[in-house]
Image (spheres, coloured by chain):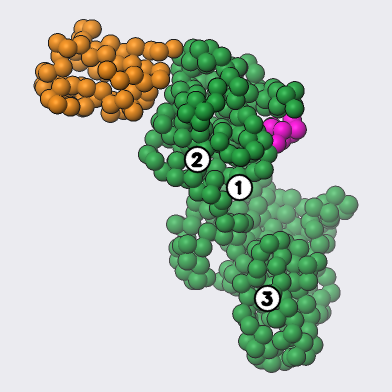
Chain colours: A green, B orange
Amino acid sequence: MRFYEYESKQVLKKFNITIPSGGIATNPDDAMKIHKELNCEVVIKSQVLSGGRMKAGGVKFSANYETTKKYTEEILALTINNLKPVCVIVEPKSGISQEYYAAITWDGVEKKPVLIFSDMGGIDIEEVAEKYPSHVSRTHLSNLKPIYDYSAKIAVSNVGITGKDLNSLSRMLKGLIDIFNKYDLTLAEINPIAKLNDGSFIALDGHMDMEAEARNYHQDLLTELNINKEDTRQSRPPTQFEIDGAAVDAQDTRGVAGNVTEFSGNLGLIIGAGGGSLTLFDAVTNAGGKPANYCEIGGNPSVKKTAELTKLIVSKPGVEKIAVMMNVVSNTRVDIVARGVIKGVIEAGFKPKDKITIFRIPGSWEEEGFKILNKYEVEYVDRTVSMYEAANISVKKMQEEQ
Amino acid sequence: MPNGMFINVIIQDKIKKNKELAKKIIEVCPVDIFELKDNELNTKEEFLDECTLCDLCINIVKDDSIIIKKLY
């Protein structure tokens, strides 16, 4: 779940990372009041869970109270990427001599957190990494051992920063690391860290994402930030298809057959197993396929649950066919999933051989599963065919029939 | 006797009214296929396809009083 900038800044402050003074306002009068208290030129920033605020006109500078009122009204009415702001931040405009970038996120390949630091902040870090690679450092952090200031110092010194600035920035980065670890974040970012004209450092903007499953562990923080339990912070409200998918999964406690996310493609996906869902979704996309959904299936769901999920996916408007693919499974029975999928397709009013492009679930009870698939003339492959190859077969079939 | 799409469970008449045996069979089935209906051991149609082929029911009767039939 994403935090708004003003929430992220509250978290930064808890860890002694300097943030600008100022406050949040939900109406122009309150914004003007904050401006009067600050008594200097201010920046007014839309609080919306989306990037691209500056380009969209969601960030404005104001030197007098009347323009603050006017800009606040405009920003509060502004929709950015289909999202309305919840409030604005009003902060002093800072006199900046240099901007830096710092973030910690997960490196899926290394399976470790990675601290990314650059002395070129304020712009897209991807762009900096591409055009000026020597200005970006990547420092992996241990999952097991305590993290010392040393790791932060390495990150900062690797882009050539020394002396007093090295110490100040390292302290900020260590604070960011502590926040990342303490609150089970998937991203903790400050962009930019600004070096002010007086030589001090300040976090001008912050972005944090918490692992959705970690919410229950951090209720204290969420309460402190006034985030209630219903506020899921998804990028959009769930669709009816997604709500129905969750209802299928909630039918009984056996296994998982749900967690669907809707997409606009024509190939329905019944996918899963130890990260298999993500891999297979990507494999389908890379092969040129257009997924109609993402989903997760595993842990030996009941036949009924699998059938209901299949029915939901195969009946989704725009879905022409489905692909049933998993990684090698040991805790999910292939025959049980085969029964569920075939039952779901038939109950939805289709023939399994017409609707299922490929069935690729190798694992326990696969011989039994293959007998079922044979009876219903569904094309299947075993573990000698990789997930990527199976995705290619599926997408090719779709393309051949168009 | 109801059929599943993939599995049929046949209970021979000779054990249908044996309540003691029925109780054990109902208890042992991990997917709740059996029930006592009108004082007779019966199967629930909606659960037949959930059969995991574990043979626990067959192990209780120790003969062909219960037959699990795969329909594929």
Amino acid, disc 1: Ser
Q: Residue furthest right?
A: A131
Q: Is residue A258 visible?
A: yes
Q: Give the alpha-carbon distance from disc 2 to disc 3, as whole Å.
A: 37 Å
Amino acid, disc 3: Leu
Drawn side of residue B6 relative to residue B61, left or right = right
Q: Are marks 2 and 3 on the same chain?
A: yes
Task: Tell me which residue sits at (60%, 17%) in the image.
Answer: A379
Disc 1 chain ID: A
Q: Nearer the viewer, mark 3 or mark 1?
A: 3
Task: Tell me which residue sits at (51%, 63%) in the image.
Answer: A231
Q: Residue furthest top?
A: B63
Q: Give the alpha-carbon distance from disc 3 to disc 1, as whole Å.
A: 42 Å
Label 2: how many Cα within 10 Å (few below 14, some 14–19, many 20+): many
- Percent position of residue A36, x then y: 69, 92
- Percent position of residue A322, x then y: 60, 29
- Magenta-span inclusion, residue A286: yes
Range of residues picked out in magenta: A283-290
- Percent position of residue A88, x then y: 66, 76
Task: Tell me which residue sits at (62%, 56%) in the image.
Answer: A235
Label 3: how many Cα within 10 Å (few below 14, some 14–19, many 20+): many
Camera-side residue of A250 and A232: A250
Drawn side of residue B33 relative to residue A382, left or right = left
As drawn, A124 above or below B65: below
Residue linked to disc 2: A258
As drawn, A3 above or below A10: above
Residue linked to disc 1: A142
